[in-house]
Amino acid sequence: MKRILSIVLALSMLVMAGAAAAETLTMATNAAFPPYEYYDDETDKIVGIDAEIAAAICAKLGYELEIVDVDFDSIVPGVQAGKYSFGMAGMTVTEDRLKSVDFSDSYATGIQVVIVPEDSAIASADDLFAEGANHKVGVQQGTTGDLYTTWDIEDTGKGTIERFKNGADAVLALTSGKVECVVIDNEPAKNFVAANPGLKILDTEYILENYAMCFSKNTPELTAQVNGALKELIADGTVQAIIDKYIPAEG
Ligand code: ARG
């Protein structure tokens, strides 16, 4: 009897300890990418679609969430090395990244678009790949925009690519005339154009992509847990409500 009692006691202490100290998941992001992740002007906290979806997933699964802001191209290696629990950064699922990390189910889509000054001679994305073209293109280092323009423009000798640490820096270089256009995801592009007068987005879309969270290949249980929570949050409309909050319907 005494034995049973002490086992019960030990067990209940374990449960209490578990309730008191929830495990923390560390999310790596690159927070210069509105509306997916950026610093709120007032609170100086990282907010956005990714931050809120991650918070909803963690709340459902009983984890604490910590968000760290790092260079975009250090997210996949950091997750792979176990430095972060996962990466979430409007990150596109690509064949190449799948060699290093696992991805969750997709929670959003993105499109690579081209930002130019309003008076630019570049009229469509195709102008960048035309025979004899020679444009200076700005991208965020290590993104799909970097990858595709490297293949389509740099490797074919049709222009040069300037790589910046983040999207905001690339757009700054565009406003100061250091590059002629920026290739970047469509929603951040809309935010940057709204914040910087004199810029516009070309109508032609470059490529459609799926966004997902990335995980170490060593934590398949966590990936599965997150996928379970994500599925429920998509089914009950939470994910769409978060997206709608940050991306107001057009028209
Ligand atoms: N979707 C692009 C990619 O995966 C760009 C993502 C950049 N994200 C960011 N938070 N800076 O390569």
Image: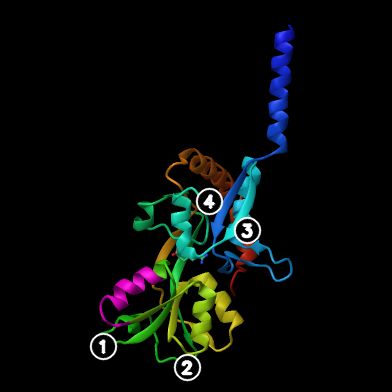
Q: Please report the bounds of the magenta region as a residue range.
A: 146-159
How far apart marks 3 and 4 lie (CA) works out to: 24 Å
Is 11 placed left or right of 31 in the picture?
A: right
Q: Is residue 21 above or below residue 238?
A: above
Q: Which residue type carries mark 4?
A: Tyr
Magenta region includes residue 164: no
Residue at 62% over, 65% down = 246
Give the number of the mark in front: 2 or 4.
4
Three-letter amino acid code of the residue under disc 3: Ile
Look at mark 2 in the image and give the residue it sits on.
119
Labels 4 & 1 near each other (Cβ < 8 A): no
Q: Amino acid at mark 1?
A: Gly
Q: Is residue 154 visible?
A: yes
Q: Which mark is residue 146?
A: none
124 up-or-down from 71: above or below? below
Mark toward the start of the polypeptide (3 vs 4): 4
Q: Nearer the viewer, mark 1 or mark 2?
A: 1
**Residue at image location 63% in from the left, 52% down from the top:** 66
**Of the numbered discs in the image, which one, if any, rests on residue 84?**
4
Q: Does the numbered disc 1 mark a residue whose Cβ is under 8 Å from ligand 1?
A: no
Closer to the N terminus: mark 3 or mark 2? 2
Query: Residue at horizontal 49%, vertical 88%?
Result: 117
Q: How does the figure colour the protein chain or chains?
A: rainbow
